[in-house]
Amino acid sequence: MSGGATTPAGNGPADTVGADRILEAENVSKAFGGLIAVSDVSFAIPRRSIVSMIGPNGAGKTTFFNILTGLYKPTNGSVNFNGRDITGKRPDKITSLGIARTFQNIRLFATMSALENVLVGQHARMRAGLFGSIFRPPWVVREERGVREKGRELLEYVGLRSEVTDDLAINLSYGDQRRVEIARALASDPQLLLLDEPTAGMNPEESGRLTAFMEQLRDEREMTILLIEHDMKVVMDVSEEITVLDHGEKIAEGSPGDVRSNPRVVEAYLGSQGEGDAGSSETASSDAVRGEGA
Amino acid sequence: MSRLRGSRWVNLGVAILAIGLAALLPLFFGKTDSFMNNAVLALAYVVMALGLNIVVGFAGLLDLGYVAFYAFGAYTVGWLASDFFSKVNGGEGIHVFVEGFAANLPGIHLNFLLLLLVAVVICAVVGILIGLPTLRLRGDYIAIVTLAFGEIIRVFAFFGDDITFADGYKLTAGRQAISPVDDVDLPLLATFDSALDLRPYYWLGLALVAFVLLVNFRLRDSRLGRAWIAIREDEVAAASMGVPLVKTKLLAYATGGALGGMSGALIGSYFTSVNANQFQFGFSIFILAMIILGGLGSIWGVVVGAILLSYINTYFIPDVFNTLPSKLGLDFDLTALNFGIFGFLIVLIMVLRPEGLLPERRRRLELKEGVGADEALVEVRA
């Protein structure tokens, strides 16, 4: 696997849309007993794009994420990553193939330092085993030094102040924890990054910065990003394509403009939530054309 | 307080100082002083506790059957360093790098370094076998399975004299001890003699402690150690970050088991006998109590806990406080209450200082701030 080489970012992602798909899920279903959380969802992500998955609470978005990353085995359907069938593979295998994720409710290793968290993220890219760890031959020493250096670089890249790299994750501010979680995901050199509500709990300014950061990841690191997000402004700003789930089913997909005007989406996603919410999403829609955050 | 850096050189310094001082200790005591006897046992228990610390302290897998590794380590020397299989090689015996008395005895007799190696390999394999059925389980259920395994192995040892194979070879000697087991024979050194001089055993125990300390420290600050801690904290997140759960957990069981086996081999040789009654369930709890007392996951804490509990067991209860009941006008033997006393100490520690005497920073946080409480995901595949 070629970990994010840096080529000049000039050609827009639009070039690759439709042609080269990094991930394809076909007819994926997941049932928990009688409850069908995801029903027959087909879905593809163009390489080097940012796409979003939206839907009301309980629509099955996170379940779908968990299927892609191997935490759940789909009841039906298949998932292909880089043309390779990854359906039902173990999460760590999928990570080493190049998919990384963050969690909706931050799941850092709370009593490890920020740096150690990022080191765990590099697990799949390291070789030291039991005997290597105990006897520490020179190559292990070099490897350890290398991953620490890379860990610090990543933390700097996501904007964590260097004074707190060795602080325990639990002692970091909420925003910093989000940063560390993204750095930890980046540490496995993913080609596809899955972000589960990354802007939850952020103010508009922070969300805007994160939006810019996602674009930076796509352009500088040639990464593909799949986003679950409730903040409509972020979604409309950053997404090239949007998929809408409701009650486990895909009810719409397309460009932000298409999705926004799709009556089924308005009904399922906005209509059910009363006038206030619909109004605010109206604002989001009109803001969507603007560039970076407020 | 929240920082985790800069402790490496401190640890190295403390280790060198402590082991250096400990190495001088026998010079102040007689060759067969009872202090030396207690000290050898304490060192063996430190090795064992540090082994269990990898499974329970680092990886967070509660193992209540650790006595199994003591048993396999001890039976390794019972089988391979005594006249137990006296008929092998036509009664001539098999001898590998052994000198002195044992070299002319029937049965299998291996050099102690080989015995250690065999014990390590056997116990690593047993560790994996015990670990396999626990992989899909969490917390309490792991404890139940390991407890049952420890008990199965004890029962096999206990009734091993009824299990015969091939030419009437028995599995164990059951309640009768396999005895005498050879004294330790190391290359370049004269054969030890536990009847005349305990000091070589002490230094051997200390060398094993030094090795196991190195293993603990190095593993803790390695790719594998971080993976163990990550699994302990959040299995789902760890797997999603590329940590293979099955392999990583099995490596914890294998490593912990291997160190327990080393200690078992040392104790077997030191007692020069191996007896099925040694492998009671209570022993697993005894070792577990050491690491809880000292501080789960804290390497120095575990060392302190093991020495403390070992001396309470071999010195304070039988020698120092044993007259206490009669002074109070009561008539019983205090040693009969030893597990009651350990239990009381654990309760005391849990109430007053749940993180242990010398807690690990992480663990202190978990207990003080409720970090890392496990929320189960519906379906995590190991």
Image (cartoon, coloured by chain):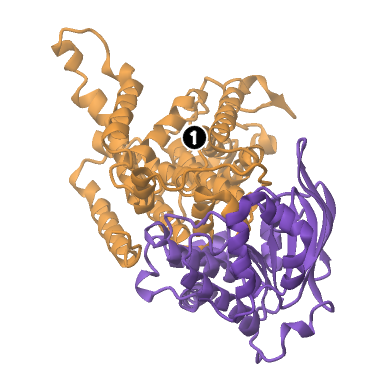
Left or right: where B364 falls relative to B57:
left
Disc 1 is attached to a residue of which chain? B
- Where, by quadrant of the figure, is residue B348 drawn? top left
Q: Can you give x and y, in whole percent of width and height, for residue A171 in the image? A: 37, 59
Q: Residue at x 22, y 25 (%)?
A: B319
Mark 1 lies on a secondary structure that is loop
Foreground residue, A10 or B249? A10
Q: Quadrant of the rendered structure where residue A122 is?
A: bottom right
Q: Depth check: B70 or A56 in front?
A: A56
- Above or below, B320 against B192 in this view is above
Quarter holding the N terminus of chain B is bottom left
Q: Label 1 is placed on what type of residue?
A: Val
Q: Which chain is orange?
A: B
The total number of labels drawn is 1
Instruction: Tell me if residue B178 comes above or below residue A178 in the rendering.
Output: above
Image side of residue B145 versus residue A175, left or right: right
Q: Position of residue B328 (x, y in %)?
A: 15, 11
Q: Position of residue B64 (x, y in %)?
A: 50, 32
Whether residue B93 is visible, yes or no, is no
Question: What is the residue that sits farthest to the left in this orientation?
Answer: B327
Give the crowd class for mark 1: few <14, some 14-19, many >=20 residues within 10 Å. Answer: many
**In front of the other: A161 or B81:** A161
Rendered shade, chain A = purple
Could one spot residue B310 in this view of the protein?
Answer: yes
Q: Which residue is mark 1?
A: B181
Q: Horizontal and vertical percent for residue B312?
A: 27, 31
Q: Residue at x 60, y 26 (%)?
A: B152
